[in-house]
Amino acid sequence: MSLRITRAVAQRVVSQLRRDPRTIALIVGVPCVLMVLLQQLFGRNSSVFQSVGTPMLGLFPFITMFLVTSVTMLRERTSGTLERLMTLPLHKIDIVAGYGIAFAVVAVVQATVVSLLALGLLGLDVAGPNWLVVVLAVANAVLGSTLGLFVSAFAETEFQAVQFMPAVVLPQILLCGLFVARDQMATWLRAISYVLPLTYAYDALARTAANEIDDVWFAVDCLVVVGSIALAIALGAATLRRRTA
Amino acid sequence: MRAPAAITVSELRVVRGDAVVLPGLSCEVEAGSVTGLLGPSGSGKSTLLRAIVGVQKVASGRVEVLGQPAGSASLRSRIGYMTQAPSVYGDLTVGENLVFFARVLDVPRSAVDRVLADVSMEEFRGRVVSRLSGGQRARVSLAAALLAEPDLLVLDEPTVGLDPVLRRDLWELFHGLAEHGMTLLVSSHVMDEADRCHALLLLRDGTLLAHATPSELRAQTGKNNLEDVFLRLIEERA
């Protein structure tokens, strides 16, 4: 693994995104609008907005980075640039890590803007430290982008890549505890939720909102999220083949 | 007398799905030469080039490049490869593309200026690649392959869609590089480019029809036009 190449890949991906201001505006603007909608829908002091708002700050980056990464990576595969990269003296991990870092940078912008809006203007209460919300949101983004990178290997077209979002992301959102508390789920659903990484990312944010970060489960959540990112990077690198048919 | 081989392909077999692309190809490319890989579209040219740079899954056979098995990690800084479709980032400028590849290859930024001059694209440095013509994009892709001053340059149809003046300039560039010891393997489906090569590999349906110099081929077939030479060789096989 080379730091020089990882940085080069990350900077390249960021410059590609910067060339596309509309996508940046959508990445940052859409979650802001949705957050306002959520607050207006349920009311500033409603228990729904207060309990769902914080985890939402993590879900937005998870979803957008999953989509953006899987499409960007698919383009790299289909345009021949990946084939060129594979003939160059670099390690596959350099590419995957470069992508992860680039989208983490974008996520910092997205999460900071949406958090400032939610915690400031919209009156979302977070009992735990506010900076931790942003850190966890960025971790969610990296998780989403590494998963997207892995999944893009199974898509042949951009249409298919987009369809992987509902296939891979929606079940995780349904089962993470957002809609139904996990201890009220049917046993088999809860069993599934234990193996889905978003469950832990959601739980970490919910515990931050409730200031339960001293709880041992918060530490477990963080470890599982970091472990899942590492696993997704390894799987993503494994799907990058030097030799293809 | 022929120079030692930079590339040795023996009994290379490539199968894609049910289709046998290369049924068992053997050939050599001499070091320091400009070798043309000619054949119609679908003859297996790109597949052979991909096998040589080590990105093609092969069923069997051996490909040795610069004394090592194709795809070896140590070869990656010694081979420049230009894919058939321009493999550069459309949403970056010409300069950003080349600076990125220069950083990956760990070559100084001055190399970017050099390769831009090589392909006569200096004035396009700040232009976004997606807004360039196909031929201009191909030249950016070629420039990226030249960055590391590789020992072997593998070019898949580098002159497609270029105007005659640019094509002539690029072939002069190729010969200049060969004079400095670089080995070039250049594919083309345009027969009139064959005359610009030291040696020719004629490929059809994954089979090697001939490996010779243009003048040897003319003498062998009694034809002057290389298009006719190719036809003659196919007829002889049939």
Image: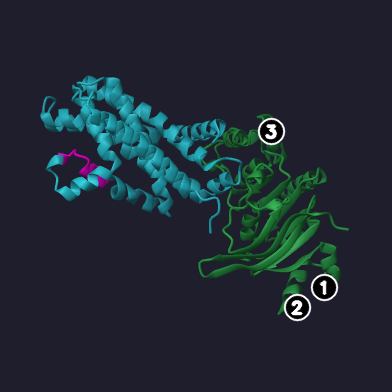
Dots 2 and 3: beta carbons under 8 Å? no
Nearer to us in this view, A99 or A67: A99
Dots 3 and 1 on the same chain = yes
Q: Does residue B142 appear to the left or right of A138 in the view shown?
A: right
The answer to whether one can see residue B158 in this image is no
- At 82% from the left edge and 71% from the top edge, which residue is drawn? B223
Quadrant placement of the N terminus of chain B: bottom right
Question: What colour is chain A?
Answer: cyan
Q: Residues within 10 Å of mark 1 (few under 14, many from 20)?
A: some
**Residue extending farthest front:** A216
Q: Which residues are magenta?
A: A170-182
Nearer to us in this view, B148 or B223: B148
- Cα separation, mark 2 vs mark 3, equals 48 Å
Which residue does the numbered mark 3 point to in the structure image? B111
- Cα separation, mark 3 vs mark 1, equals 44 Å
The x, y position of residue A213, in whole percent, is: 24, 24
Quadrant placement of the C terminus of chain B: bottom right
Dots 3 and 1: beta carbons under 8 Å? no
Q: Amino acid at mark 2?
A: Glu
Q: Reply above or below: A91 against A104.
A: below
Dots 1 and 2: beta carbons under 8 Å? yes
Task: Give the chain of mark 2.
Answer: B
- At 22% from the left edge and 40% from the top edge, which residue is drawn? A176
Task: Give the chain of mark 1.
Answer: B
Task: Give the chain of mark 3.
Answer: B
The answer to whether one can see residue B235 in this image is yes
> Which is in the foreground here, disc 3 or disc 1?
3
Q: Amino acid at mark 3?
A: Ala
Q: Which mark is residue B236?
A: 2
